[in-house]
Image (cartoon, rainbow, N blue to C red):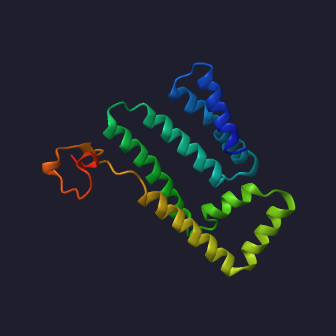
Amino acid sequence: MDILLPLLVYYAARALGAGQTSALLLGGAPPALRLLAGAARHRRIDGVDLFFTVLLAAAALLSLIGGGPRVLLFKNAALSLAVGAWALGTAFTRRPLAFQMGQRLHRGGAARARDGIWQDSAPFRRALRVLTSLWGASSSSTAPSARSPPRPCRPTRCHCWTAPSRCSCWA
């Protein structure tokens, strides 16, 4: 529900004619409401709800930025970097993001059993910290670069060893 409900709200809003920014903000409402309700009920902020709320709010803010292909690449890179930084930032906290996300997939006895394994098993904790670190590093390193996309150029300017019609150069 944490991922499905925001997506359903977003696509429903878009289908009803809402703009991208409005739909993103509406899609961010379910995790934001869950975050506030959890904070009021348990007097603590849930990391996964905070993660989704911040990510959807950042996407909504970035959608306000207009521009050409370079700006689009920047926006994609910024969100990938934000996800990577968040994951890396939680890698050595009390509960890394991979553990928190896994807990969301389990309910009741399974979640309690997983929590017990977390308490008792150093290899399990180490594996989830490594997984979170790899997730964060991967998201950060695969962020699209802000350089311009390849453009066709004259074969004389390229050093292509293939057919000149398939040659392209970076601007």
Furthest toward the right, the residue is: 109
Above/below status of 118 relative to 64: below
Q: Position of residue 3 (x, y in %)?
A: 66, 44
**In the image, what residue occupies the spot 31% across and 40% down?**
70
Side of 152 where 14 appears, left or right: right
Would you say residue 89 is visible in this rendering? no
Residue nearer the viewer, 48 or 102 = 102
**In the image, what residue occupies the spot 58% across and 19% down?**
17
Would you say residue 124 is visible in this rendering? yes
Furthest toward the left, the residue is: 156
**In the image, what residue occupies the spot 54% across and 45% down?**
54
Side of 152 where 156 appears, left or right: left
Residue nearer the viewer, 138 or 97 = 138
Above/below status of 66 relative to 162: above
Q: Position of residue 51 (x, y in %)?
A: 58, 50
Residue nearer the viewer, 11 or 78 = 11
Above/below status of 70 relative to 89: above
Q: Position of residue 72 (x, y in %)?
A: 38, 38
Marks counted in the figure total 0
Side of 171 where 145 appears, left or right: right
**In the image, what residue occupies the spot 75% across and 79% down?**
120
